[in-house]
Amino acid sequence: MMSHSPDSTLHPAVVDTYDRPLKSLRLSVTDRCNLRCRYCMPEAEYVWLPREDVLSLEEMATLAGYFADLGVDKVRLTGGEPLLRRDLPRLVRLLLQDRRITEIALTTNGVLLADQVQELYDAGLQRVTVSLDTLRPERFRQLTGRDEFSRVIEGIESVGKVGFGNLKLDTVAIRGFNDDELIALIEFAKHYQAEVRFIEYMDVGGANEWAMEKVLSRAMILDRLSQHYGPIPALPERGAAPAQRFLLPGGTIFGIIPSTTTPFCAQCDRSRVTADGMWYLCLYATSGTDLRKPLRMGASPERMREIIRSGWAVRRDRGAEERKVLERGGRRDGGLIGIDRLREDPHLEMHVRGG
């Protein structure tokens, strides 16, 4: 399949029922992962997407072009673990052929990063985010089920060496597990000119045994850090960016993504396409739109754009806010979706839809 050529025709901006624009696309390139993190995919085995259903790199670039026709200008490559996808730099180059896509970023667990970072940089990738939940090798092994801590640190070190700036480190903050490492993580990030983003533990999926008591809230994070650093002012909000950013004495900036206690649904401009072409309008959505089928059946660019436009126009998703409402009735504990249903439909797993 040929890559989609940018359409020079002006298309009206597409907004959903809450006037949220379609601006950011999270493109999952694989459902596979080389770690088994407790909060994401703790099971030993999963039902994987059929290989024949997984989109080619050209198909992914073509779909991204249709989204760009309707206003998307930022693409984040996710997984699973995206560096498991062969020839990922070629996808970066394909996406960059569309000048309307102004930012291509990558979220990775870092295990394979050092081996591929130079090629990704040369291809034109602009930003890298590495998941790092602990600085203790034994704790890393407990969390991920793998002994790969040293390779993750090597990957983080490699980012600056090849020339990337604006490195971000994503930390899922889990009460009673890594809540004693907040300061250490910030100091570690300083060394690499990186910005830590603490993410509240989210109740997506059903295999992770989520419970509200495990959530380290934004308020708790700020309280613990202020005891060490002193008063911590907030920085001005940045549009639809999920992280709330804060300034420490000395100029260090860190972020908090408070999806569980303070959802940001009202500003959410992102949607997700899985590696096999299912389009989800919300991380919490339980159903999606199949874009692979019309794409492979030869649907015209006009038809593909209409599927996306009409899907976004009726979007009412406020998934994180709806989950929060359940707290009032004491009905939130436990994952969003039961594990039996997850095994029946792997698309409901967070690692498939690019968390």
Image: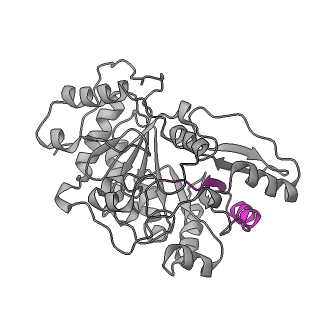
Residue 5 within the segment the image draws in magenta: no
Total count of labels:
0
From the top left corner, tell me how far across and down residue 88 is, in percent. 34, 58
Compared with 22, 205 (above or below) is below
Please give the name of the residue rendered at 51% of the width and 73% of the height, measured from the top-left corner.
Answer: 144
Residue closer to the observer: 34 or 349:
349
Compared with 201, 141 (above or below) is below
Q: What colouring method underlies this structural image?
A: one colour
Determine the image quadrant of residue 175. bottom right
Q: Is residue 209 visible?
A: yes
Q: Is residue 150 visible?
A: no
Residue closer to the observer: 32 or 116:
32
Please report the bounds of the magenta region as a residue range: 179-203
From the top left corner, tell me how far across and down residue 119 is, in percent. 41, 62
Please give the name of the residue rendered at 54% of the width and 55% of the height, measured from the top-left corner.
Answer: 333
What residue occupies the far front of the structure in this picture?
329
From the top left corner, tell me how far across and down residue 284 is, in percent. 44, 45
Determine the image quadrant of residue 150. bottom right
Please give the name of the residue rendered at 54% of the width and 38% of the height, measured from the top-left corner.
Answer: 321
From the top left corner, tell me how far across and down residue 188 is, in percent. 71, 66
Determine the image quadrant of residue 63. top left
Decide if residue 227 is on the left or right side of residue 86: right
Residue 199 within the segment the image draws in magenta: yes
Residue closer to the observer: 219 or 291:
219
